[in-house]
Structures are given as structure tokens and as C-alpha cells.
Image (cartoon, rainbow, N blue to C red):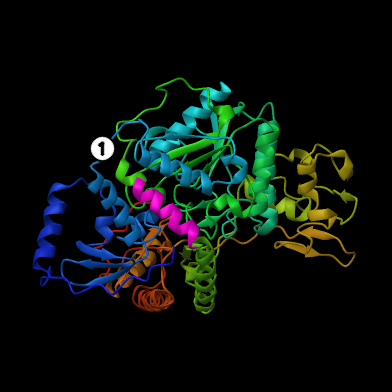
Amino acid sequence: MAVTQLPPMALSAVSDDGGATQGILRRQALRESAARTYARALPIVPVRARGMTVEGADGRRYLDCLSGAGALALGHNHPVVLDAIRAVLDSEAPLQVLDLATPVKDAFTDELFATLPPGLAARARVQFCGPAGTDAVEAALKLVRIATGRDGLLAFSGAYHGMTAGALAASGGASAAGVPRLPFPYDYRCPFGVGGERGAELSACWAEMLLDDPKGGVPDPAGMILEPVQGEGGVIPAPDGWLRRMREITAARSIPLIADEVQTGVGRTGAFWAVDHSGVVPDVMVLSKAIGGGLPLAVVVYREELDIWPPGAHAGTFRGNQLAMAAGTATLAYVRENHLSQRAAVVGRRMLERLRRFAAGRPQIGEVRGRGLMIGLELVAPETGPIAETGPIAEAGAMAEAGQAGAAARVGPAARVGPVADAAWEGAPGGATPYGASQSEVALDEVTPCEGAWLTGAEGEGARGALGRGVRQTPGGEASYAGVARTAAPPAAPALAAAVQQECLRRGLIVELGGRHNAVIRLLPPLTITDEQTEAVLDRLADALDAAISTSGTRSGELPPAAAPFAPPSAGNRR
């Protein structure tokens, strides 16, 4: 199947001078819920769309880098999707069949299984859920609890899994901390104050030691849920090595690993599924958004060994959406046959490279990151000054850099631990090391691998091998802790991000905001984005960034007057 180049969209017959648009927006504000989000930041009234182009009722056109929060892998109204939907309608097939078998459903299941990681597809089961990712998350949590006989769950800081009770409880923004949160490897704002591979390793060690600590307060969990790339959390890709460590840790303890691929799936990150980058085969995969070709559809795919729940354990009226299954089959096949995941990797690298060059001279752009066509720019307020990371986790991370606060960590088979100059770290009262020794030699073969990771870097080369930030090298070749943790990134600038979003809209570009403080500009273009559109997106975004920076400043306070009428949406895409 050849990649279809869509023809230019003809001028719309539906156009006004803005009066009808404003009337529709006013009626929406009067009649719809105060919980609406995107409509507040994007005051447009779409009437037509094709590919990446959206046309409003006022005749204005936009390049859409929101793509239905990632649901439109092929963009709007792709011909193969429309043909699949028309075929079902013309056949007079039932449109809604609960969980009955149909030829449309059978074809969708065949195509879905053809794309799954082989280690899972060979012995997989699929549960069709209510038509939203959050319901599929609920089903996955229910599945592992029934299969293991356990109730607890492990999730990660910054996560977003949906807006229903169970999914929200596992998300980073939950008001009640009923689910333990493990530190996600967020390099730019490392919770350990270390960053890089060391930060990711410490995150893995933290998880391992918490699970193995009989006094850690965390009972054996029913499962661990994670996103291979945190989307709403700020477009934070999990390092491949860290994902493999999570797989090792959970497999060794018979803990089902749940991969939430609701937004990362179907080629978005440069592989068909984001877990494919690392080679990890999860026990459970939660899938939605793009698998329905733009129509509501959600499933859970899991190892057959977990399939012990009784009939009706999870149900839903609209799990038999035939139009979505037909659209999904066409989308999955088109992405697979046309190697769009590989194209997403190539185009994504090109976009990241250009954006990083652009950001190099602009301190307001703290970091450009992403994977494939899932890209984020974290905006900051550099003039407020960096803030040193503090607290037990940051202090522990600093100790991981140097071996011991206020002392020296010698590179080699043993780490010399001296007195603690500042015993602020809770685990080191009276000058003890993290392992109970005091002013003594701690041989690495006497501690666990994770404990050794606190004292040395990879392969015994010392703290991060090259002596990490916050560490100084003494004339004798030893590293001593400089007294502070790694300097943190500048504060987030959500007001600047909101101003950039509005400047983008004025230039005909639709982008989303996300991240911990809603200060990350997110790009989720369709996988069918052309080279010409790619350059147009980057040009408009660069122009919008410069305009917002020059007019609004970079402090994280009030919005400038030009952007004030448009409130940024709350984090989360309301699955």
C-alpha cells in the first residue's frame, strides 16, 4: 500500500467574518461544563479537516500538532480510514455488538496481534473495553489484582493514566496518595539531583530496595504500571536500560508489568510500540487512541497466564464499536505496511536537532526532548536563578555522586568512607554510611549490587565514571562531595508556555501544553506529516517562541495582557 499524498484542501464554503465563530464559542461557554479544557486555550471552531490541516468556521487554517491528543496517527480524514468506515456502513453490518464476534472484529484482532511484540503476541489474550484509555487502565489493574490475589500497585511520579478513580489514583496528580510513587528517571529535573545514567540507575535501585525492604511499608504489589514515554507528564522518555531493569525487577518478583501505551503506541515514538525500543516484553499492554483510527476504542492485551478472571469481570456497553474497529484495522495496517514508525523516527530526529539548535541561544528553553513524533520543549524562567535540590532524595543522590557527604569516595574495589560533615541525610545519623558502617572501608563485594551503585559508578569507575556534578576531584585522585547537590534546573514558566501556545495559534499552529507545571510545549503531529509541513511547523513555532519571549518575559507569574484571555488547559488529556 503506497503512502497517500493528500490533495490540497479546497476553500470552504463555510466561512464567516468571525461573528458566527464567536457566537458558537459564547454558547459553548454558557452551556458546557466548567471542566472543559482544550476549548479554553484553543478558541477555534473546526468545520473541516484533512491530514494535518484544520479549517475553522472563520476560514482560518491551522497545522494541527495536537492530533486529537495523539489519537489521529494518520491525521484527519485519511482516505484509508474513510474507506474502511464507508465499507462497514454500506454493508449494513451492525454498528454495536457488545462483545459478540464479527468479521470486522476478527480482522482487527488479526491486525493488532500482527503488530505486537512477538514475545507477547504468541500467547496473548485481548479484552475489549469501554471506548477510552482510562477504562482499559481500570481493566488492566483489575486483571492483575485478580490474577495475583494481591491488591497493591506501584506507579511513578509524573504519570498520567486517566481520569477514572483507579487510573487517577495511579497518576501523578492524584490528591490522595493511595498508590506508592517511585521516582521516574526525569533527567532535566532528576529527583536524586544527579541526572543521566546515574539518575536512572538510582531510580531502579530505589524501586528494588523498596520492594525488598520488609519494613518499607509497601506490601507485595499486584502490578507495576508505567509509560515508556510520559506524555502528559512532560514528554519524558524512559531510558531503554531503565525499562529493561524494571522488567528484570518485576519478573524476578513475579510482579506483572503493565505498559501504558495509550499515547505512545502505533508508531508515535519511532517504533510501532514504545517498548520495542528497549526490547522489553510487558505482561500487560494498555492500548487506545490511535488504535481506533480516530474513533473511540480501547483494549488490554496480556499474557494468557493472567486470564483467570471470571466472565463479566470487566464489561461495557460500547466495547463492540464496529466503525472504530474497521478504522483501527485500516490505520494499523497502513502504519505497518508503509513503515510510518521508521519515518516518525527520522522526522522526529530532524525536528529535535533543529529545535535544539534553536534553543541553544535561548535560556528560556530549558530542554528539548522526545522520541519520534512525540516532542516537548520545557520552558523555564532562567532569570529567577537556579535552585539547589534539597531533601533526602536529592541528598542521597549527591551521596551517590561522591560516595559519602563531606568525605571522599575512592575509585577502585573499596570506597573509603570518612566522617559525615553534615549529617542531614536521615539515613546517616552519627556519621554512619548508608549501610551502617562508620569511618571504615566498605568493600563492594560485601554489599548488594544496588548498594554498590551508591558507592561506585558503572563497572567500578567511580561516581558516574567521570566524577559527576557537585563533586570535585582531589589531587590524590579521590572525589569529594562539594557540599551541595547538583544544581537544579530553573523554575518552570507556565505563563510563558501559555503565551507561546497563543502565539502559535495566531500563526496557524495548534500545540498542546503539558508537564508538571504545564510549562512544556508538546508536539504530536500525525505520522503522515510531510517534509514541507515539518519545516512550516518548526518555522511557526520558532517565530512564536521568539514573540512570546520578547513580549511576556520569562518569569513564571501573571500572563501578559495579550495572552490573558486564554487560560492554559489543565494537565491531562481526559481519556
Is residue 464 placed above or below 259 in the rendered structure?
below
Is residue 314 placed above or below 104 in the rendered structure?
above
The single residue placed furthest to the front in the displayed view is 91
Circle 1 packing at 10 Å, graded few (<14), some (14-19), many (20+), is few
User: Which three-letter amino acid code belongs to the residue tagged 1?
Assistant: Pro
Q: Residue drawn at (21%, 74%), measured in percent from left and top?
A: 10
Magenta extent: 326-338
Of the 4 image quadrants, the one containing the C terminus is top left
The image shows residue 242 at horizontal and vertical percentages of 65, 49
The image shows residue 161 at horizontal and vertical percentages of 44, 42
The image shows residue 359 at horizontal and vertical percentages of 51, 75
Give residue 426's quadrant in the image. Answer: top right
Indicate whether residue 308 is drawn in magenta.
Answer: no
Q: Nearer the viewer, residue 105 or 203?
A: 105
Q: Residue drawn at (41%, 66%), measured in percent from left and top?
A: 528
- With 536 as the anchor, is 210 left or right in this view? right
| Element on which disc 1 rests | loop
Task: Please give the residue where the numbered disc 1 appears in the rendered image.
Answer: 94
Q: Residue drawn at (48%, 70%), measured in percent from left and top?
A: 365
Q: Nearer the viewer, residue 398 or 529?
A: 529
Indicate whether residue 331 is drawn in magenta.
Answer: yes
Chief SS of the magenta region: helix
From where the camera sits, is residue 54 visible?
Answer: yes
Give residue 252's quadrant in the image. Answer: top right
From where the camera sits, is residue 484 visible?
Answer: no
